[in-house]
Amino acid sequence: MAKITKLDDIVSLCKRRGFIFQSSEIYGGLASCYDYGPLGVELKRNVREAWWKSVVKMRDDVVGLDCSILMHPMVWKSSGHADKFVDLVTVCKKCNTRTRVDHLADHACEHTEHVPVETAMADAANLDKKVCPSCGKIGQFSEPMAFKLMFETQMGANADDTMTLWLRPETAQGIFVNFRNVLDSSRVKIPFGIAQIGKSFRNEVTTKAFIFRTREFEQAELEFFCEPGTDEQWYEHWKEQRFKWYTDYGIKKENLRFRDHDPDELAHYAKACVDVEYKFPFGSGDWQELEGIANRTDFDLRQHQRGMRTINDWHEAGRDVTKIALKEETEDYHKGPLSYFDEQQKARYIPYVIEPSAGIDRSTLAFLVDAYDEEEVKGKTRNLLRFHPALAPTKVAVLPLVKKEGMPEIARKIYDGLKGCFTTFYDEKGAIGRRYRRQDEAGTPFCLAIDGQTKEDNTVTVRDRDSMEQVRINADQVKNYLREKLDM
Ligand code: GAP
């Protein structure tokens, strides 16, 4: 089985087949921003839909949410992002390249996600033996400095009422600040989860890894609220569920693994964290984070209770979060506005939270890479994407054998009957073999061919992408046949 071995191969496949393009390409491109083309947009929608189906629709204990990207600046003060969401960076004095300090460690680039700033500081104390990843020079680095990862923007039309806001760097906080709203407006009872899919933004220092790490990306996050003491059991539950999701949708088991975070890698809010890693064909060591699953304890809800008590200070400080400190927690914080009354336990507490946090773009990349295959057929190379049918951008292609003898008219009628149910593609140009190959490369699981016999007995051939086997069925049965095969 062929493997995509270089990032360049993925980039070129994605561009050639209309999956992913560089953003603003006609102007030379915008670094680390990408656009999804006709096939990519369908693939990504299907990845999103598959996540939502598994995490929300198929469960009785999870509800959904869709929050705004712009949020009150106090959200980020309380969450810790306004003060702590930075990467420590240094500049090579020889080649002027800016690099994250944690990427200069001896285990350079093994863990590519942000490390707590305290951990990076420890690395920064000893830069004289570190190597510049760009020019190879040893120990020639500037004094490390903090680089803010949140994008800043201004809200307000008048100079005197403008306020600094941030584009959200994670979707999770929208869930925490709506915890009370969801509790009061739905019949949820702990244990339950709130899920959200949406855009997040980070002014990443290290990019250049195609859609693996971008400055604008989509996250799929679940905050699962549970009684303290049951958190470890739910942590294990979600580890298992999330691993299974990737394999259910076609990722090969040998390309997936768990990696527990070391204590010095844990984010300030986490009691435990594990990454689901995928063996991407790039980067040092190949294995890279696909998703993080964290035990966030009661940290966030408690922080937001402190933030709510600090709101007057924020107004008094001219609405500038950098000029204030969060008020200390009260002794009875567990009875605060974001607490939960557990009727069974007859007790009030701040729930613990288990958070599986996935990247839709990163998963899309993993599904693409994992589905890619090449095989020899009659002395020729066949390139194909063996997508799970639920993820395939196009489910079925309708192909008249030739562009005459009434075949296109019949094919069009069949196409019109299918397109309301499945993402369907119609193609009548070129040799049928070449059209099959194009669909293989787009990952289309089924092709219908309309030929001379169709006119006689109303049958069509259905060709399977993976086995290339063809069966003849009545045209009236096509919809049911596909529904069964595609599980839709
Ligand atoms: N709320 C927790 C959180 O945001 P994270 O590990 O920083 O945790 C979770 O992000 C997931 O979001 C990652 O595993 C990855 O899939 C995705 N992600 C994070 N930063 C990304 C970026 N710059 N580009 C693409 N995906 C990213």
Image (cartoon, rainbow, N blue to C red):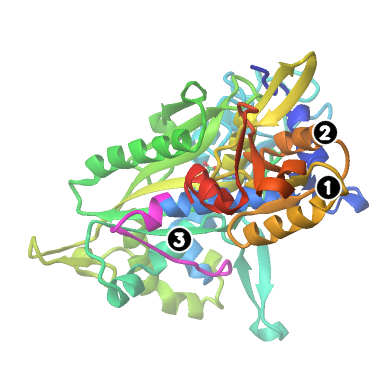
Q: Quadrant of residue 279?
A: top right
Q: Is residue 391 above or below residue 11?
A: below
CB atoms at circles 2 and 3 under 8 Å apart? Answer: no
Closer to the chain start, of discs 1 and 3, is: 3
Q: Provide residue 452's location: percent of width, then percent of height.
A: 77, 42
Q: Amino acid at mark 1?
A: Glu
Q: Which mark is residue 283?
A: none
Q: Provide residue 313's location: percent of width, then percent of height.
A: 44, 76
Judging by the rendered image, the residue that carries numbered circle 1 is 428
Q: Is residue 334 left or right of residue 111?
A: left
Judging by the rendered image, the residue that carries numbered circle 3 is 173
Rendering quadrant holding ligand 1: top right
Element under disc 2 = helix
Closer to the chain start, of discs 1 and 2, is: 1
Instruction: Examine the rendering and report whether any part of residue 393 can be seen.
Output: no
In front of the other: 382 or 254: 382
Judging by the rendered image, the residue that carries numbered circle 2 is 434
Closer to the chain start, of discs 2 and 3, is: 3
**In this rendering, which labeled residue sits more in front, label 2 or label 3?**
2
Element under disc 1 = loop
Q: Is residue 413 left or right of residue 71?
A: right
Task: Write down the region rendered in magenta.
Answer: 54-70
Q: Amino acid at mark 3?
A: Gln
How far apart marks 1 and 2 lie (CA) works out to 11 Å
Residues packed near mark 1 inside 10 Å, few (<14), some (14 to 19) or many (20 plus): some
Residues packed near mark 2 inside 10 Å, few (<14), some (14 to 19) or many (20 plus): few
For this orientation, the residue located farthest to the right is 27
How far apart marks 1 and 3 lie (CA) works out to 50 Å
In front of the other: 217 or 430: 430
Q: Quadrant of residue 444?
A: top right
Residues packed near mark 3 inside 10 Å, few (<14), some (14 to 19) or many (20 plus): many
Residue drawn at point x = 28 percent, y = 76 percent: 184
